[in-house]
Image (cartoon, grey):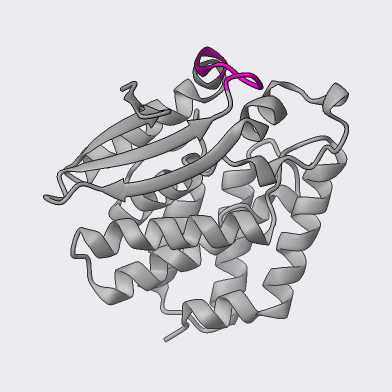
């Protein structure tokens, strides 16, 4: 069976992720490189592990997470769908079983807001890992006078944690933000659609989703 470590170390996959990130960086997007896909894989795997899913499902989820933004090498528009097609070709050539490719490709093709949704547990966990990655180190622009609102909101985040409560009934994204840089309202203006997607993904997995900012429960 193809493992997450094999995927993470594959030179061709890494080359595609690197070039995809370079393309987004060139047009001013926040970080979508190895730091992002690594964190998304960690968080998505954590979600399924805490909910008692099989080890192989967790492994496939981490594989999907690591490859989920590979479609940005083609274009940001419809990158989830192009990424799913690219991932299919790569995984098929590596000899992954068809039923496993199907799960990974489905998750990748459904991770983006507006066109996707939690259609299986791997897709749900991928959405949660991806949409909760907000942090100051995602800002690629070094000149603060040139920040757009996405840069400002990410730059304001001091800490970010995704964790279940003890009973595993609620998944909470806890943020600490510098309100001198960005207001809570600015966060919602940019990320409301993503938080709604997280709420639906959590519901698919049978749990609730909550957001706290600076110690206050917002949703």
The quarter of the rendered structure image containing the N terminus is bottom left
Compared to 21, does 50 lie above or below? Answer: below
Front in this rendered view, residue 212 or 62:
212
Would residue 180 be counted in the magenta stretch? yes
- In x, y percent, where is residue 65? 50, 59
Residue at 31%, 75% in the rendered image: 56
Pick the front one: 206 or 38: 38
Give the residue displayed 41% in from the left and 73% down from the top.
98
Spot occupied by residue 4 in the image (x, y as percentages of width and height):
49, 76
Instruction: Please determine whether, in this image, residue 139 is positioned above or below residue 32.
Output: above
117 is higher (above) or lower (below) than 104: above
Q: Residue at x 23, y 72 (%)?
A: 54
Q: For residue 20: magenta?
A: no
Q: Which residues are magenta?
A: 179-186
Outermost residue, left direction?
167
Q: For the stretch drawn in magenta, what is the main secondary structure?
A: loop
Percent x, y for residue 36? 61, 54
Residue 85 x %, y % = 59, 57
The answer to whether one can see residue 21 in this image is yes
Q: Residue at horizontal 53%, vertical 57%? A: 39
In terms of image quadrants, where is residue 203? top left
Quadrant that contains the C terminus? top left
């Amino acid at each position: 069976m193809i493992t997450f470590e094999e995927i993470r170390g594959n030179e061709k996959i890494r080359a595609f992720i690197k070039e995809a990130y370079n393309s987004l960086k060139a047009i001013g997007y926040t970080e979508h490189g190895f730091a992002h896909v690594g964190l998304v894989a960690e968080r998505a795997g954590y979600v399924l592990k805490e909910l008692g899913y099989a080890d192989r499902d967790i492994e496939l989820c981490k594989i999907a997470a690591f490859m989920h933004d590979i479609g940005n090498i083609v274009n940001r528009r419809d990158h989830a769908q192009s990424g799913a097609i690219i991932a299919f070709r790569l995984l098929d050539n590596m000899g992954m079983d068809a039923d496993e490719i199907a799960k990974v490709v489905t998750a990748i093709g459904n991770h983006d807001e507006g066109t996707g949704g939690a259609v299986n547990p791997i897709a749900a966990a991928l959405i949660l890992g991806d949409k909760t990655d907000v942090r100051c180190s995602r800002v690629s622009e070094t000149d603060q006078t040139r920040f757009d609102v996405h840069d400002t909101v990410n730059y304001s985040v001091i800490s970010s944690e995704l964790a279940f409560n003890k009973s595993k009934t609620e998944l909470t994204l806890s943020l600490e933000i510098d309100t001198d840089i960005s207001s809570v309202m600015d966060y919602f203006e940019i990320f409301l659609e993503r938080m709604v997607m997280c709420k639906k993904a959590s519901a698919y997995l049978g749990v609730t989703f909550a957001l706290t900012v600076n110690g206050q429960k917002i949703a």
